[in-house]
């Protein structure tokens, strides 16, 4: 019986390896994130969430809801960080990245970035128009915001853009630890931008959670397609003659 079980386990492992266990895991995570977005969206459409109100209130001074916890200096830092998800900086970073990719002879990778960013923007605009959720009025806004609230645009574009950059540059590195570091950094920046949107009172936490789910899932989808195309030689992993960083 033990011999049969061991043989079955080996065959199962070989079958999974032949079908790329990593891509299967990424695909599973993609569907989990999409499902998470739809569950949040369904709950939002059924009415206000009490947890949204509690979180927004917890980030303000009890005696003055117009002041965020941490004081004016911290508020200034938060405004600086939230700009990492703004349209202006995203365009500047994207143009700079496209220039680098084109100069290093990666036109397909450049197109990959364009599709990731523009696709994210278009999807976010469509969803904002569809759900048409008003901005929070529970606490005063600490910066201007007027378009629909759900899902958070700053958060969604950050959750797509920064992990996509990390994934692109991770292809140049063989050391798994460094690749995970880059990806973790991209995820951290996106989550940090999401927090700033809540802190500033311009988004409900559910807006941000939905933006993270959808942004990460879009980045995953683009990444999965990019890896498949890279294996077929359609998307370049590195420029011709450029050395690949070797493991330590």
Image (cartoon, rainbow, N blue to C red):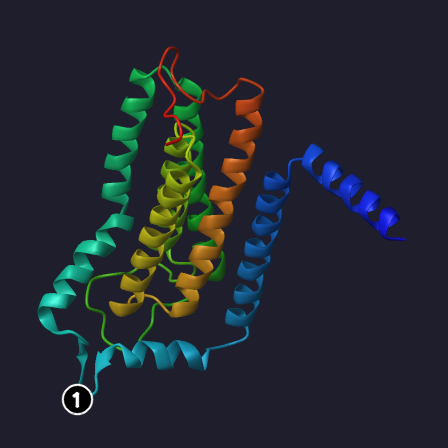
**Label 1 belongs to which residue?**
63
189 left or right of 129?
left
| For residue 66, above or below residue 5 | below
Which residue lies at the image location 47% right of the left edge and 43% below the top edge? 219
Does residue 138 appear in the picture of this structure?
no
Observer-nearest of 207 and 129:
207
Up-down: is 131 above or below 17?
below
Nearer to the camera, 28 or 38: 28
User: In this orientation, which residue lies closer to the viewer: 88 or 170?
Assistant: 170
Image quarter in which the C terminus is found: top left
Residue 75 % position (x, y): 15, 66
Q: Is residue 233 left or right of residue 142?
A: right
Image coordinates for residue 111, horizontal then vertical, percent:
42, 25
Could you say where residue 26 lies in the image, as x and y percent from the top left? 57, 45
Q: Going 49% across and 22% down the picture, which residue do you hit? A: 235
Judge whether residue 103 can be spotted in this image. yes
Residue shown at 43% from the left, 59% from the top: 151
Residue neighbourhood size for the residue with mark 1, other residues' Cα within 10 Å, grouped as few (<14), some (14–19), many (≥20): few
Q: Is residue 21 left or right of residue 212?
A: right
Q: Residue furthest top?
A: 241
Quadrant hosting residue 139: bottom left
Task: Write down the quadrant of residue 88 in the picture.
Answer: top left
* Local SS, label 1: loop
The residue positioned farthest toward the left in the image shown: 73
- Picture layout, residue 131 above or below residue 169: below
């Amino acid at each position: 019986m033990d011999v049969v079980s061991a043989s079955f386990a080996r065959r199962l492992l070989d079958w999974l390896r032949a079908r790329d266990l990593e891509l299967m895991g990424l695909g599973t995570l993609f569907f989990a994130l999409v499902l998470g977005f739809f569950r949040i969206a369904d709950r939002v459409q059924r009415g206000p969430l009490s947890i949204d109100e509690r979180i927004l209130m917890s980030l303000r001074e009890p005696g003055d809801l117009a002041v965020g916890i941490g004081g004016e200096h911290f508020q200034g830092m938060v405004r600086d960080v939230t700009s990492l998800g703004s349209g202006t900086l995203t365009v500047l970073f994207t143009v700079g990245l496209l220039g680098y990719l084109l100069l290093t002879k990666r036109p397909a990778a450049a197109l990959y970035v364009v599709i990731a960013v523009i696709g994210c923007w278009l999807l976010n605009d469509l969803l904002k128009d569809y759900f048409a959720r008003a901005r929070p009025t529970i606490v005063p806004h600490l910066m201007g915001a007027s378009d629909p609230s759900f899902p958070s645009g700053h958060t969604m574009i950050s959750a797509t853009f920064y992990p996509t950059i990390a994934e692109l540059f991770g292809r140049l590195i063989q050391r798994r630890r460094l690749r995970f570091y880059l990806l973790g950094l991209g995820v951290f920046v996106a989550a940090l931008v999401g927090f700033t949107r809540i802190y500033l009172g311009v988004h409900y936490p559910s807006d941000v959670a939905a933006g993270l789910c959808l942004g990460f899932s879009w980045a995953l989808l683009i990444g999965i397609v990019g890896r498949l195309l890279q294996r077929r030689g359609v998307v370049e992993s590195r420029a011709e003659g450029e050395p690949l960083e070797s493991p330590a």
